[in-house]
Amino acid sequence: MKFIRLLRISSIQSYKILFYIYKMIKISILGAGNVGSHLFNKFFETKNIQVIQWYNRSIKSIEHHKNKVNIIDKIENLIEVDIYLLCLSDDSLASIIPQIQTLKGIVAHTAGSVPMNILNGIKNHGVFYPLQTFSKNSPISFTNIPICIEGNNKHSIKILTSLAQNISKNIKHIDSKQRQGLHIAAVFVNNFTNHLYQIGGEICEELNVSFDLLIPLIQETAKKIETTSPDKAQTGPAIRNDQNTIQNHMDLLSIPTFKDLYLTLTHSIQKNNEHSKL
């Protein structure tokens, strides 16, 4: 028996849809990388969701879950469910989509940089994109993770949104262009920033000091932008145009790529500061 309750959902596009379905959502996950593994763990513990199958080309990496879910390594063994989540790399997506054209459920990929229209040959399709960084051995709470939803029709949007509501309070309806832009922004604030942490760690190691000394600074920087825009929070020799300190840093840096990156970021900060004053 299905109990239906209407709930107002806000979207980034400022349109509103009303729905909420209290029912068991049956899903199959395709892919066992970082995203697929975290989603499986979360969905498995969520009472309104039932993971029916988990597909991966290599069963060995997920065979320890065989007492929880039907594990398969052949696409033709997929059975009918409400949603098929493609937690696959961009290259794998392109190769597997021609094999799943006849699936009757909703097929949704989880990639930030791939447009929804890659699934155009499938009747009901969409995107279920959790905007977060995932590492297999790092536990994560889904409660406030933005889940970005896109669908090719009202049915796909409704069911994908219902799935997202079961694991997160932060649901956004955005289109492919917006999502791809968000993915670029995420690369800057996450992947590139993490690379800078790596460089900072190498400099610390060269000086025989602990990287842990920088952790309070990293934490304060992240905390600050919760209440202050990044341009207002910017500090350091670049924005002060402190040429003596900048030159001193350049003289101390011994690796050419670090020098180039230091100068590139310094000039970018200064250029952005000039622009913001116009």
Image (cartoon, grey):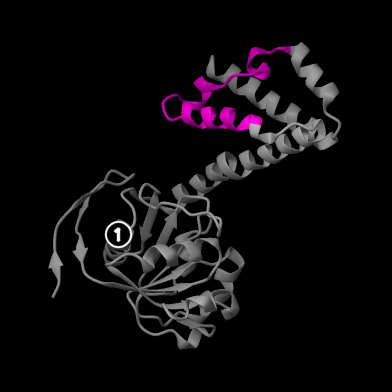
Q: Residue 86: where, in percent of width, then height?
A: 48, 69
Image quadrant assignment for residue 127: bottom left
Q: Is residue 49 above or below residue 278?
A: below
Q: Is residue 238 magenta?
A: yes
**What is the quadrant of the N terminus in the image?**
bottom left
Which portion, as a residue range, is magenta? 213-242
Foreground pick, 229 / 278 = 229
Say whether residue 215 is left or right of residue 1: right
Q: Residue 90: where, in percent of width, then height?
A: 58, 64
Which residue does the image show at 34% across and 44% down from the upper left?
A: 12
Q: How many marks?
A: 1
Which residue does the image show at 51% across and 81% down from the upper left?
A: 99
Q: Is residue 143 above or below residue 111?
A: above
Q: Secondary structure at mark 1?
A: loop
Q: Is residue 146 magenta?
A: no
Say whether residue 84 is left or right of residue 118: left
Q: Is residue 169 above or below residue 117?
A: above
Magenta stretch, overall SS? helix
Say whether residue 251 is left or right of residue 143: right
Foreground pick, 215 / 131 = 215
Q: Residues within 10 Å of mark 1 (few under 14, many from 20)?
A: some
Which residue does the image show at 15% across and 72% down from the upper left?
A: 2
Q: Residue 176: where, in percent of width, then height?
A: 45, 54
Read off the residue under disc 1.
Answer: 166
Q: Residue 55: where, in percent of width, then height?
A: 50, 78
Say whether residue 198 is left or right of residue 250: left
Image quadrant assignment for residue 250: top right
Q: Is residue 75 above or below residue 15?
A: below
Residue most extreme to the bottom = 77
Which residue does the image show at 41% across and 26% down from the upper left?
A: 227
**In the rendered structure, which amino acid carries the disc numbered 1?**
Asn
